[in-house]
Amino acid sequence: MRLTLLALLAKEPAHGYELKQALEHTFGSAYPSPNIGQIYVTLGRLEKDGLIRAIDVEQSNRPNKKVYYLTVTGREALAEWADEPTEGPRIRDEFFMKLVLAPLTGIADRMALINRQRRHYLGVMRDLNDLIERTDPDNRVALLLIEGAMLHVQADLDWLQRCQEDLA
Amino acid sequence: MSAVIRTVNLVKIYQSGGVPVTAVDGVDLHVGAGEFVAVMGPSGSGKSTLVHMLGGLDARTSGEIWLDGKRVDTLSESAWALLRRDKVGFVFQFFNLVANMTVADNVELPALLSGATPKQARERREYLLDALGLTERAEAPPAQLAGGEQQRVALARALANEPSLLLADEPTGNLDSRNTRDVLRLLGEVHKKGQTIIMVTHDARVASLADRVVSLLDGQIVDDGVIPVTRRRPKAGAGDVVELRS
Ligand SMILES: Nc1ncnc2c1ncn2[C@@H]1O[C@H](COP(=O)(O)OP(=O)(O)O)[C@@H](O)[C@H]1O
Ligand SMILES: [Mg+2]
């Protein structure tokens, strides 16, 4: 969440609760709504690392609130993040580890592992289907996120099939 | 559960240029009434051959096929044609629509042939074309339709006579994601109403609608089982597809 918060602060200074609202507004249901505690913890860490700074703003009848803004270092970190290519989510695959190790340990049969994993992925896909049915059709960001997840699951299934063909 | 389809040690050997190719190699399959079974497997694993045999479009080499409690692998081609008219809907990989008939007539014809009244056939056609987003194409000849549209017409046609068994071979190969969603909805709907479905598909979105997945490899069933319910929280939102990291 660090860089998401930095990106939101690059637009304008804000306090913790405003950041929570901005996250919800930007992503809709496509991003799990973070609790305010998580946001404050992350802001604390960013401040300690010198990427953001806070000023106290006095409020009548209420305790002061902290408004955060981006430092030059913070802006550089954000630019660097935006510029660098992003690792895909599946460079290292835990299932692959199981598949390779299975015959060494004698704990599981490779074909059985593949078959079970295939059914599991189809179960995941069914959840994604349900999710897309329940998602507001106007929420482009959420739909794209779910479609992306579906394409990943499809790729995982294709790869399982390759494993089954080659290892059978 | 009474079996709509049952096969016993089903085998298909093609003789291509003197070399025998075993396309289906001892398949025992049991599909109960109302079940939706997805058939998956790599290219050349025998998926098309299997469903063609189940629909009587390809003769078995040995083994038995039972449809609705009746042995059918021994039937003549004309007896099969009657059986398909009344009991089996088939969606092919390549749609096989009648070129000189409108979309509407393509869909109504099988219903009429299987004994529906013109009114019933028309209502069924209207329902199916509407569900697949094709109402506006009803009067067009198939040749004017895009590939994805023709494929949806083929599905509507296969469902027109409310068959006891729907067989489909890669019916969503040409669809974009929006059209796939229409097809998924319709399949989910007819399945909920009790339609038995055996569907070859590579598309995980389609397969995930099924109750069961049968995996073929080299003409043999290597896995046959239910698609499990995952442990996802029931009210999960789209946000659960991403992991929150702080
Ligand atoms: N008409 C045919 N003549 C000879 N061989 C065939 C014929 N149809 C299919 N085959 C062979 O049978 C095997 C299974 O084919 P098919 O059922 O089409 O597999 P799939 O649908 O899983 O890709 C393949 O090796 C294929 O080459
Ligand atoms: Mg095929």
Image (spheres, helix red, strand yellow):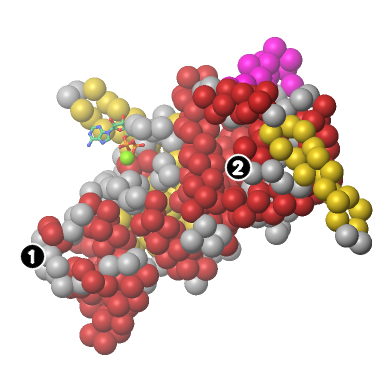
Residue ID for mark 1: B100
Quadrant of residue B235 within the rendered picture: bottom right
Q: Residue A110: x and y, percent?
A: 62, 24
Badges 2 and 1: C-beta atoms under 8 Å apart? Answer: no
Q: Residue B158: x and y, percent?
A: 30, 64
Decide whether residue A95 is among the magenta residues: yes
Ligand 2, image quadrant it occupies: top left
Between B63 and A92, the one nearer to me in the picture: A92
Quadrant of residue B181 within the rendered picture: bottom left
Q: Is residue A162 above or below residue B168?
A: above
Residue drawn where x is 79% and y is 30% of the image: A47
Q: Is B126 displayed left or right of A21 in the figure?
A: left
Q: Is B206 displayed left or right of B237 in the figure?
A: left
- Residues in magenta? A90-107
> Residue type at mark 1?
Asn
Q: Is residue B66 above or below residue B101?
A: above
Q: Residue B180: x and y, percent?
A: 39, 54
